[in-house]
Image (cartoon, rainbow, N blue to C red):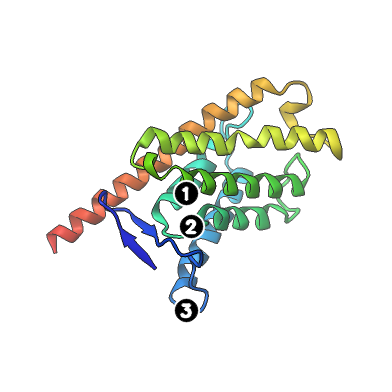
Amino acid sequence: MTTQVADGAWQPKSSLNSIDWASSEEWPRITLLLFAGVAATVLHARLHLPLKLPGHHGLEWMAILLFARCTSSYRWAAVLVAVGAASSSAIPVWGFKEPGYSYALVYLVQGVVLDLLYVTGIRLRHWTLALALFGSLAYVTKPFVHWLLLQTVGGHYGSVMSDLWFPVASHLLFGFTGGLAGVLLWKAARRYRDSVSRSQ
């Protein structure tokens, strides 16, 4: 399933079949990724930060998404997390202002974009800031998706109702900050794992 590279991270083999669906050992890992997405939805609904800037939930969402992406060996790990978030966000119990389908679509787009950046940017993945930038670029897709939905199906989509470029700048900032937190958490967890392994 995995090969180990020089920096100690576990990465997928080149095979297109990056998830062995027949192996019962894989399901707990898949379930954890899906529940990470559910946790992001719960935090989005219940965590009320005293920030009035568009995109501030990128702090927790991109921290979760980048941490899961960096710790997993699956080629489409971010997509699995996004599926968990999209599925749970579609349940009409959270009181979101935007339509539930818009949240689901945004989560899925961000998961796909992050995985594509992570897979194609293999030479940049040992750089903390590059990984955080991947998170920023994935997260900034949200105002563009909302703007496209506004132009096509209508509805209420927060800050993009009056402007687009300020939400874009704000999402870039929060996506980068949240992504950076996720990457630093992953590196701290990896150092702890390595220290435990050496002590045994």
Percent position (x, y) of residue 153?
Answer: 86, 40
The secondary structure type at the circle numbered 1 is helix
Residue 119 has which mark? Answer: 1
Task: Answer with the quarter of the image where residue 95 lies.
Answer: top right
Say few, some or many: other residues with alpha carbon within 10 Å of mark 2 (under 14 / 14 to 19 / 20 or more): many
Q: CA distance from mark 2 to mark 1?
A: 7 Å
The disc, 2 or 1, on the residue closer to the chain's N-terminal end is 2
Image coordinates for residue 171, horizontal then vertical, percent: 59, 30
User: Residue at the location (46% across, 51% down)?
Assistant: 69
The structure residue drawn at horizontal position 52% and vertical position 74%, both measured from the top left corner, is 21
Kindly identify which numbered label has been placed on residue 75: 2
Q: Which one is closest to the eye, mark 3 or mark 2?
A: 2
At mark 3, the secondary structure is loop
State which quarter of the image contains the C terminus. Answer: bottom left
Q: Position of residue 83 (x, y in %)?
A: 62, 57
- Which of 130/30 is in front? 130
Tag 2 near tag 1, CB within 8 Å: yes
Position of residue 2 measured from the top left corner of the image (x, y, whole percent): 36, 64
Q: Tag 1: Cα neighbours inside 10 Å, few (<14), some, or many (≥20)?
A: some
Inspect this view and state whether residue 109 appears: yes
Q: Alpha carbon of mark 3 to alpha carbon of mark 1: how far?
A: 26 Å
**Could you tell me which residue is drawn at 50 percent across and 66 percent down?**
30
Upstream in sequence: badge 3 or badge 2: 3
According to the image, label 3 marks what residue?
24
